[in-house]
Amino acid sequence: MDTRSPMAVRFEAFAKDLQSRICAALEKVDGSGQFRADAWERPGGGGGISRVLAEGTVFEKAGVNFSSVYGQLRPELAASMPGEGLDFFACGMSLVLHPKSPMIPTTHANFRVLQRGSALWFGGGADLTPYYPVREDAEHFHRVLKAACDRHDPAYYRRWKRWCDEYFYLPHRKETRGIGGLFFDYLQNDRERDFAFVSDAAESFLPAYLPIVDRRLRDAWGEPERQFQLLRRGRYVEFNLIFDRGTTFGLKTDGRTESILMSLPPLCRWEYDAQFPAGSREAGIVEWLKPTDWLGLGPDPLTEERP
Amino acid sequence: MDTRSPMAVRFEAFAKDLQSRICAALEKVDGSGQFRADAWERPGGGGGISRVLAEGTVFEKAGVNFSSVYGQLRPELAASMPGEGLDFFACGMSLVLHPKSPMIPTTHANFRVLQRGSALWFGGGADLTPYYPVREDAEHFHRVLKAACDRHDPAYYRRWKRWCDEYFYLPHRKETRGIGGLFFDYLQNDRERDFAFVSDAAESFLPAYLPIVDRRLRDAWGEPERQFQLLRRGRYVEFNLIFDRGTTFGLKTDGRTESILMSLPPLCRWEYDAQFPAGSREAGIVEWLKPTDWLGLGPDPLTEERP
């Protein structure tokens, strides 16, 4: 029996269509790369479509996943979730884009709905991980996401920008994964209003990211920049394999490994105690990798500032 | 006050000396690479010496760590450990060697002592991760380790070979990390006898590994083998960052990040759903990555076989 609420069904159609449109837009930007699509089924119920573009002109690896799964929650997992009973339904679209040029930032976005019993909630977000950060890019990315938030609730941007900074943090490196964005979860106010926001935020991903690709596409780079990119991609791997809840949860609960690990970079490296000359852009990246008020909003009037 | 037992002090001297001797032997085998040494201090007490050889002729990256730390255990951690009180002392030597040639296996070894209150126990092991496995190499590695075990207890080899197969397992890949070796922990029978065994096992590492390097050193390889090695190194990263207790424990408890992550390969890659032609050595590796009775010992007479 299909126990999905009408909203879950509606979001599923939206997410599937969004995957197609995003892939089409990325192929157009790339110019040569094409997405391959793998449809897969989940033994416990449901399935998905993994779409990957490898070795394109712009994108070294672009993975765009759609999944829609249902089944029975394990009780210990259910204990920490809204709703009642063990039946669940989860549907989402997620992507990670690894450009070839070190001058173009890596990006991640994810929009999803979960249903358990009578509870239904949305989660998601988008964030940017530059290797050679540019202030106007960070501002543009945040400005577009803020505009999407502001169309729905004036408190959203600050709240989810902060959650993003807190979530995408590598404690052992004492740095954020990138320059932030949005991260939200357990959004369950009014289903219509929530869907309006989530779909708006999701539609804002391409306008937030693609102009940055366009700006950086012709920036020159060589072997030193490439090597730095590979090193920084190692940090991306560290975050995803050690801390990212979606990744570790998926791997430990029999998810589809290849789809889960589509987020990992095509090539990366680790160098013991890598150091860069003082004053170099490489050494300077640490200044970018901490929570930053990109849009000059000042202290949040709606919440207490933390020390 | 130094609360270390005489055995802890003795093991520390052994481990430090072993680090030096192993580094000297590896430099000799490499021919061109040299270890750099970083002495570091742990804010909570103690410190260590990290030695790394990068971009040698034989070794693309070789990390050999010595650490000797003490302090106060967090109570939630102490709950799962032998002994009493919160004072602890931990000392060990660990190494991971990443050869440049895909024909030479990667290897890991680790020997350590822990003391908490009146309890003192040893742990450690050694294991081999080939990219192009050769039967005689797997047999040699296991044979040398078994001989070390057999000199101390006829039950040791089978028990710790099995524990190694169980520990170095990637459930999301349904494969072992490599072809196994030894893994043991909580060894606390008789301190003299235990030390005799652990030091014997530690001394056996080079005789177990170096003849394999020597045999494979002139085996031809090219770009396809290199790419396969990089892909398999990704699995090594997956194990170390997701499952390895030492790595995740160290990173989550403020250990020295650069020393902990010395185990990661210098360069690696991930490719979505990589496939290899049926019958190729690359496709065949999965046959090697499961618990295997390399020495033809048959069912263990001392323990029940599991289904």
Image (tube, coloured by chain):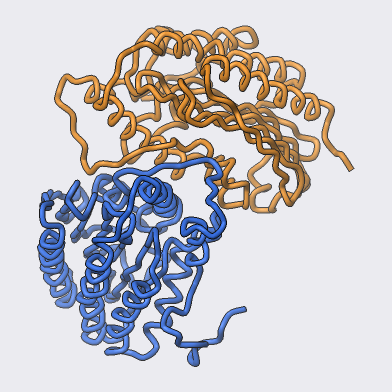
Chain colours: A blue, B orange
Tell whether B265 sits left or right of A150: right
Q: Nearer the viewer, residue A95 or A210?
A: A210
Residue B292 vertical position relative to residue B244 in the rendered view, above or below = above
Q: Nearer the viewer, residue A306 or A5?
A: A306
For the C terminus of chain A, give its image quadrant.
Answer: bottom right
Tell whether B88 sits left or right of A68: right
Q: Quadrant of residue B4?
A: top right
Q: Position of residue A185 (x, y in %)?
A: 36, 73
Residue B274 vertical position relative to residue A75 in the rendered view, above or below = above
Q: How many marks?
A: 0
Residue drawn at x 33%, y 29% is: B229
Residue drawn at x 35%, y 67% is: A127
Q: Nearer the viewer, residue A258 or A71?
A: A258
Q: Is residue B184 visible?
A: no
Q: Position of residue B111 (x, y in %)?
A: 63, 26
Residue drawn at x 76%, y 22% is: B191
Residue drawn at x 56%, y 40% is: B246
Residue B276 vertical position relative to residue A114 in the rendered view, above or below = above
Q: Position of residue B17 (x, y in %)?
A: 72, 22
Q: Is residue A58 visible?
A: yes
Tell whether B207 sits left or right of B192: left
